[in-house]
Amino acid sequence: MSETSNTVAAVNVRRPRLRLDNRYIAPLFITFILLVGHLSYGILESYPKTALAIVTALVIELILGRIFYGKWLNLASAYITGISVGMLVRSPAYWPFALCSAVSIMSKYVLRVKGRHIWNPSNFGLSVLFFLGAETVAGLSIQWGNFVAPILVIWILGSIIIYRARRFHICLTYVVSFFVFAFLRSWITGQPWQAEVAPITGPMYQLFVFFMITDPKTTVKTKWGQCIVAFLVAFAEFVFRLMQVVYAPFYALFVVGPAANLIEMWWESRSANTSMKSI
């Protein structure tokens, strides 16, 4: 009886559990956003252009990963970058989709400080493209319309996923700050508060909130620091919107995110030097 029990216990220990790798939760979720948005409101420019953005990101990641690290890297991050570009870029031409994905992925390998890339890849590529290619390229501005259900489903799922990743505090800080600054902006400009709040209901902001500002590779390390940075991104966006800058959230993160990372690196280096001197 004892031997049988031990055998059953050993089998139970060895039996593999069906678990989804956390690295693939975000790609599945962003694909869900794409499907809901496109099937409901046709947010994609076209399937071929979106596919081009995704394939370009995957290929560049494979090539550069092999060159820089000598191995084939996991493509979950590159897929998120490619699909984000495919959703957010608007252009009659094909080249902006490929170029934006390529620039985004290459920024991870080229723009590095002390072994870290300091810009979120898709935020960097989109910001550069929107700024330099304004005559040919635009960003997604379509919202979900008057239907609340898709917004609620995506925000609930996104909140659960981000909570599991222990980065919900970043999203919460940004969203609360966005609403506060939206009401302040409404008071300053005289615009209806609904018009100032409305952008956060769109797919562009859902990608921005759940994927760009929470990117583990390009956020500061401490929880309180992450909250401060999220607040500063919302504040910078507030200023850009007062200046009537169209792509205010992207430019806000483009400026604030790397600055925060550089300050953190400087502080860590300073603290390390102080510790060495005290020994």
Image: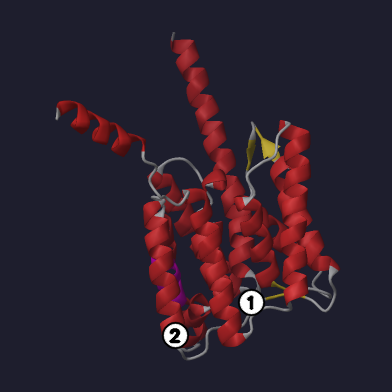
Cα separation, mark 2 vs mark 1, equals 16 Å
* 10 Å crowding of disc 1: few (<14), some (14-19), many (20+): few
Residue 235 location, x and y as percent? 50, 63
Q: Is residue 183 visible?
A: no
Q: Quadrant of the N terminus?
A: top left
Q: Which residues are magenta?
A: 175-184
Residue 6 location, x and y as percent? 22, 29
Q: Which residue is mark 2?
A: 193
The answer to which of 40 and 18 lies nearer the viewer is 18
Q: Is residue 10 visible?
A: yes
Residue 24 location, x and y as percent? 52, 54
160 lies left or right of 51: left
Amino acid of disc 1:
Gln
Q: Residue at x 49, y 62 (%)?
A: 210
Q: Residue at x 53, y 70 (%)?
A: 32
Q: Can you name the residue that lies furthest to the left here?
A: 1
Q: Secondary structure at mark 2?
A: helix
Query: Mark 2 near mark 1, Cβ–Cβ under 8 Å?
Result: no
Q: Earlier in the sequence, mark 2 or mark 1?
A: 2
Does residue 215 sit above or below 241 in this rendering? above
The answer to which of 163 and 255 lies nearer the viewer is 163
Q: Residue at x 41, y 52 (%)?
A: 167
Residue 179 among magenta residues? yes
Q: Residue at x 78, y 43 (%)?
A: 63
Query: Residue 244 shows which numbered tag?
Result: 1
The answer to which of 59 and 165 lies nearer the viewer is 59
Residue 19 among magenta residues? no
User: Quarter of the image holding residue 44?
Assistant: bottom right
Q: Secondary structure at mark 1?
A: loop
